[in-house]
Image (cartoon, helix red, strand yellow):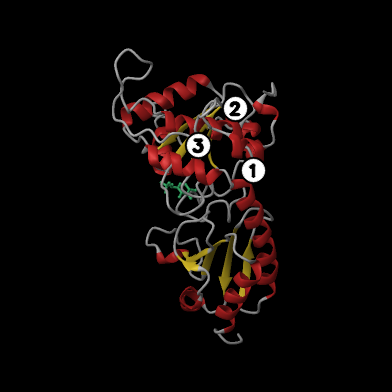
């Protein structure tokens, strides 16, 4: 038995080993999927709204990934939106919310690259809380709690679960009082996750480091090549991560034609899965009009980068020379 503190382990090791049952002869190595709506009386938990051992396996692993603080706590929610609603419950009556221009449902993280430490300093000065939705990144790319953010929001649906087969959300904080308020909100608000979703998300997270590394490497190659393509007028790529936005010469029609022409890339919304996806964002009625009509958002997956490039280049070449 090693006496090493799990907080001394690298993220990859925490991801692979996190949330496993206590080691004992004959014990399962994989967490149990506990499907129950209630618990026998006189234990710590009385009903499914409060907690579930499968959620806990996922939550402990995520908390250890987001933070080295012993008090760090993650709470799983039924979806990213359920997590965001719970975070909004922290607002005092008559309180104010300050949000970036392109927040979720926009191309958040692509058009606005935010100076988080500066935002944290400004909010501290007025005694406000900072809640950051870091879904377009991962705790391997950046840990918002280390920058002084109070609560991190994650749509686990995206990179953490990583296989486009789960909808789940999470909030993570280092502050036990905030964690308690958010836990109460989850219990009473009802956005509790299904145990199977938490199980699948933890299973997906075991390879997050490998998927993230490959997706980021693929994105760097593609962003550079896209910038050279004559039908691409603009590339938005923050220099890291696996999300790229490009503007296609020829307007909405041309961007739509690229969506139709690809065969390896999936024309679909969402992001963060092993499979590469792209979509023209303005196809959604709610997309802000400040997002250009010809903008394609690319979520780069973990396929072979040459196959991804060949497919994309062929689709762009099929538009003809500008
Ligand atoms: C997808 C997404 C959400 C919503 O999460 P769901 O799990 O789909 O409810 C929130 N924020 C961002 C940045 C997202 O990409």
Question: Marks 3 and 2, how far apart in space?
Answer: 42 Å
Residue 285 screen position, x and y as percent? 37, 62
Q: Residues within 10 Å of mark 3 (few under 14, many from 20)?
A: some
Image vertical order of residue 177 relative to residue 205, above or below: above
Task: Determine if residue 174 is in view.
Answer: yes
Question: Marks 1 and 3, how far apart in space?
Answer: 23 Å
Number of the label disc, if any, that sits on residue 124:
2
Residue picked out by circle 3: 30
Tell me if the residue at label 2 has its CB under 8 Å from ligand 1: no
Q: Assess whether mark 2 and mark 1 are in contact (beta carbons under 8 angstroms).
A: no
Residue in view at x 52 percent, y 69 percent: 265
Question: Marks 1 and 2, how far apart in space?
Answer: 26 Å
Say whether disc 1 or disc 3 marks the residue closer to the N-terminus: 3
Say whether disc 1 or disc 2 marks the residue closer to the N-terminus: 2
Q: Assess whether mark 2 and mark 3 are in contact (beta carbons under 8 angstroms).
A: no
Residue in view at x 65 percent, y 56 percent: 214
Residue 320 screen position, x and y as percent? 58, 87
Number of the label disc, if any, that sits on residue 74:
none
Q: Residues within 10 Å of mark 2 (few under 14, many from 20)?
A: few
Q: Residues within 10 Å of mark 1 (few under 14, many from 20)?
A: some
Residue 19 or 315: which is nearer the viewer?
19
Residue picked out by circle 1: 140
Foreground disc of the pair 3, 2? 3
Residue in view at x 60 percent, y 39 percent: 16
Q: Residue furthest front?
A: 26
Question: What secondary structure is found at the residue carrying circle 1?
Answer: loop
Residue 211 or 119: which is nearer the viewer?
211
Residue in view at x 44 percent, y 64 percent: 268
Residue 62 screen position, x and y as percent? 54, 35
């Amino acid at each position: 038995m090693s006496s090493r503190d799990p907080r001394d382990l690298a993220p990859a090791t925490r991801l692979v080993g996190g949330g496993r049952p206590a080691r004992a002869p004959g014990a399962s190595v994989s967490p149990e999927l506990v499907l129950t709506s209630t618990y026998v009386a006189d234990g710590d938990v009385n009903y499914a709204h409060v907690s579930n051992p499968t959620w806990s396996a996922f939550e402990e692993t995520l908390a250890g990934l987001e933070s080295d603080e012993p008090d760090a706590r993650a709470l799983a929610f039924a979806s990213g939106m359920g997590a965001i609603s719970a975070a909004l419950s922290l607002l005092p009556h008559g309180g104010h919310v300050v949000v970036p221009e392109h927040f979720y449902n926009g191309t958040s993280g692509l058009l606005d690259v935010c100076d988080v430490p500066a935002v944290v300093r400004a909010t501290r000065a007025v005694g406000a809380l900072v809640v950051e939705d870091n879904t377009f990144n991962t705790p391997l790319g950046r840990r918002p709690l280390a920058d002084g953010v109070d609560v991190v929001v994650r749509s686990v649906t995206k990179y953490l679960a990583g296989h486009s087969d789960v909808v789940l959300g999470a909030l993570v904080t280092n502050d036990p009082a905030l964690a308690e308020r958010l836990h109460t909100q989850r219990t009473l608000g009802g956005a509790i996750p299904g145990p199977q979703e938490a199980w699948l998300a933890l299973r997906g997270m075991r390879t997050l480091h490998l998927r993230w590394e490959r997706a980021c490497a693929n994105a760097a190659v593609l962003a550079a090549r896209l910038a050279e393509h004559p039908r691409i007028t603009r590339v938005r790529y923050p220099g890291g991560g696996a999300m790229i936005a490009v503007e296609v010469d020829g307007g909405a029609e041309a961007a739509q034609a690229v969506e139709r022409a690809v065969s390896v890339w999936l024309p679909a919304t969402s992001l963060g899965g092993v499979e590469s996806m792209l979509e023209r964002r303005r196809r959604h009625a709610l997309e802000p009009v400040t997002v250009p009509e010809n903008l394609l958002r690319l979520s780069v997956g973990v396929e072979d980068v040459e196959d991804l490039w060949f497919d994309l280049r062929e689709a762009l070449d099929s538009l003809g020379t500008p």
